[in-house]
Image (tube, rainbow, N blue to C red):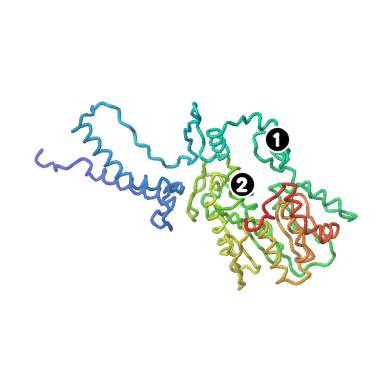
Amino acid sequence: MEADRTTEHHELGPSAVKRAHDTIDKIKAAILSHGNPFTTEGDNLHNVITQACIPDEYVQQILNVDVTGQKLYEDYVSKRINGDVSLWAPVKKENNKMFLSGNKKIAVKLRDNTVDLKTKDLLARLMVLARSNRDIDYKEAIGNYEFTLTPRALFAPDGTILPCHDKSKLIHLLEKLTKEDKPTEVGSSTHQDAVDTATPDLTSSDQPSRKIALVDGMVLVQKLSKKPATVLTVKDLSVCFNDRLMQLTRAYDEVILVFDTYRADSLKNATRNKRRQGKYSIQYQVRDDTNIKHISLSRFLSHDKTKSDLTEYLANKTLEYNKRSSKLIVTSASAITRSNKDLVFQENNHEEADTLLIHQAVLASQRNPHDAQLVFFSPDTDVLVLVTANYEIMLKNTSISMASGVVQIEPLWRALGKERAKALPAFRAFTRADNTKVVPHR
């Protein structure tokens, strides 16, 4: 009886082999549920599951982990097995950094003391440098000789510039200048629900021959911060985004969708970094199958490269979903403007959607009849300022759909006058409400 038994390893039995194949199929299905890693375009090293990109400064450490491990092994053998170092002596752990923050602290000697400085804290580093070379009593100098060149009221006690929190008050001040019997009711321009405003009614009894809608794309994206349960991947997000856009502009003949352009060397990027308050941002791959079910939209958009890729992705998807639409759909993202019709656009250098909206509005005014209607969908007071300043080169029937009402531009422009209307952006910068849109080539 014993001789008749086949001698084989227990893991080679039919049931064991079947379990192994089932396990392999499950692992393969789990990987493919997050996308095929071998079809990813580009050479960025990223996490296969989360699609988060590895910071560039840590890529070589990860790629050379086997080489580093072999070198550590050889050092261990030469020093502890063949050398004089005790086998039981402590072993220093190799610290392979991956997703750690790059905002490291550095110990700096300040006379007899040692202080820790963050590498990005420029003011603190300059103060340490000054104290190391000059005998200056800063308490006496700052206390007795105030900074008279700039008003103290513009700064917080820690030296940071105070932001302007009442930008929307300008709307009410402009509204007081109008002489209309029934002025348009205007609400706060910082409300995120501005894109939910219904289609504005015309002040004139004449119906426009054509209606053009200009939409700030990132405002619409922020409206999706509470993702529906059906949004599991980036492609699902694009479908939801397109549905919201088409619902908002259902009564319009032409839809112009614009996005911010994210540049690493701009003033706006420095402002975004300050708002981040040292929080580490993770870059994600923007692909159809990128799973964002368990990732909040704010976390997904924390990295500027991810936002830049998403704006291009949404612009392309919007044209793809509406390529056979009877409406004229125009999208502008990352300095590239395209449409679903045979229109040719030149590249632009606008960084912010605010100024890009004005640029596209002027182009739309030139290619449409004079009795067409132009409506901006934006909650930003800055857009109101720019539209009023440039109203002379736009269609006369121009308005802005804001949080709780529609602002007609013509009454504001007539109340201000041509010269004062053109000076509005400079006035906006002077009051520190917005100081980047008047800086040329920023």
Circle 2: residue type: Thr
Q: In the picture, which quadrant includes the C terminus?
A: bottom right
Question: Which of these two is toward me, 190 or 248?
Answer: 190
Image coords of residue 237 (percent x, y): 56, 53
Marks 2 and 1: CB-CB under 8 Å?
no
- Vertical placement of 290 versus 114: above or below? below
- Vertical placement of 293 versus 95: above or below? below
Give the residue pinned by disc 1. Answer: 146
Are there few (<14), some (14-19), or many (20+) residues within 10 Å of tag 2?
A: few
Image coords of residue 146 (percent x, y): 70, 35
Q: Earlier in the sequence, mark 2 or mark 1?
A: 1
- Vertical placement of 188 versus 260: above or below? above
Q: In the picture, which quadrant includes the N terminus?
A: top left
Circle 1: residue type: Glu
Q: How many marks?
A: 2
Which residue, as the protein is rendered here, is positioned at the far left?
Answer: 3
Res. 271 mark: 2
Q: Which is in the foreground here, disc 2 or disc 1?
A: 1
Image coords of residue 233 (percent x, y): 51, 51
**In this image, 233 relative to 407: left or right?**
left
- Vertical placement of 350 versus 95: above or below? below
Measured Cα–Cα span from mark 2 to mark 1: 26 Å
Q: Secondary structure at mark 2?
A: helix
Q: Secondary structure at mark 1?
A: loop
Q: At 27% from the left edge and 26% from the top edge, which residue is drawn?
A: 89
Q: Is residue 26 visible?
A: no
